[in-house]
Amino acid sequence: QVQVVESGGGLVQAGDSLTLSCTASGSTFSTGAMAWYRQGPGKQRELVARISVTGVTSVQNSLRGRFTISRDNAKNTIYLQMNNLKPEDTAIYYCNTPSRQLVWGQGTQVTVSS
């Protein structure tokens, strides 16, 4: 069973940057698309960005220009580079496939103070 572990979150100030990592076990990672999601306080979990196995990316419209998704198949890892963070980016960030096939990990908390 594929498991994912997210890391890299923290408490930052508005305008700062963070890079999140998601490492997955198993063969599914290197052969499938992956995605980042987030769930803010009192909000539903939402898709942030996705990346195909060949590196084609898609980022939520409202986050384009600030968030970048990438992957390293050799390391079974995807990344989320987040720049110019805003308080509204405060959330728990998770990774999964675009169809949410995997068991959810614990996520990594990102808190942005104003």
Image (spheres, rainbow, N blue to C red):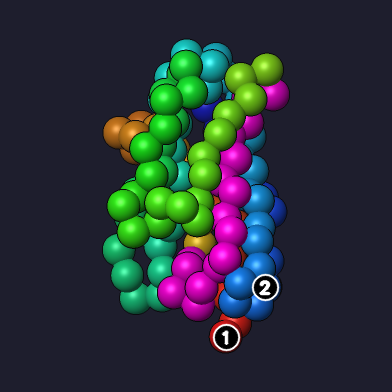
Residue 24 screen position, x and y as percent: 59, 30
Question: Does residue 114 sit above or below 73 in this rendering?
Answer: below
The residue that appears at 42% across and 25% down in the rendered structure is: 56
Contact? badges 1 and 2 (CB < 8 Å):
no
Helix, strand or loop at label 1? It is loop
Position of 5 with respect to 97 (left or right) is: right
Q: Residue furthest bottom?
A: 114
- State the separation of the CA atoms marked 1 and 2: 9 Å
Mark 2 secondary-structure assignment: strand
* First of labels 1, 2 by sequence position: 2
Tell me where residue 19 appears, x and y as whole percent: 65, 51
Which quadrant of the structure image shows residue 103? top left
The three-letter code of the residue at mark 2 reads: Val
Does residue 42 appear in the picture of this structure?
A: yes
Q: Position of residue 49 (x, y in %)?
A: 41, 43
Q: Residue at x 41, y 51 (%)?
A: 64
On whether residue 47 falls in the magenta region, the answer is no
Residue 87: say if magenta.
yes
Q: Which residue is mark 1?
A: 114
Q: Quadrant of residue 3?
A: top right
Q: In the rendering, which numbered label is found on residue 12? A: 2
Residue at image point 50% right, 77% down: 87
Q: Nearer the viewer, residue 101 or 34?
A: 34
Residue 14 picture location, percent across and down: 59, 76
Rendered residue at 44%/74% (across/down): 88
Q: Is residue 24 in view from this perspective?
A: no
Report the front residue among 44 and 58.
Answer: 58
Compared to residue 112, the image places residue 92 above or below, namely above
Q: Is residue 16 left or right of residue 54?
A: right
Q: Residues within 10 Å of mark 2 (few under 14, many from 20)?
A: some
- Report the span colored magenta: 75-91
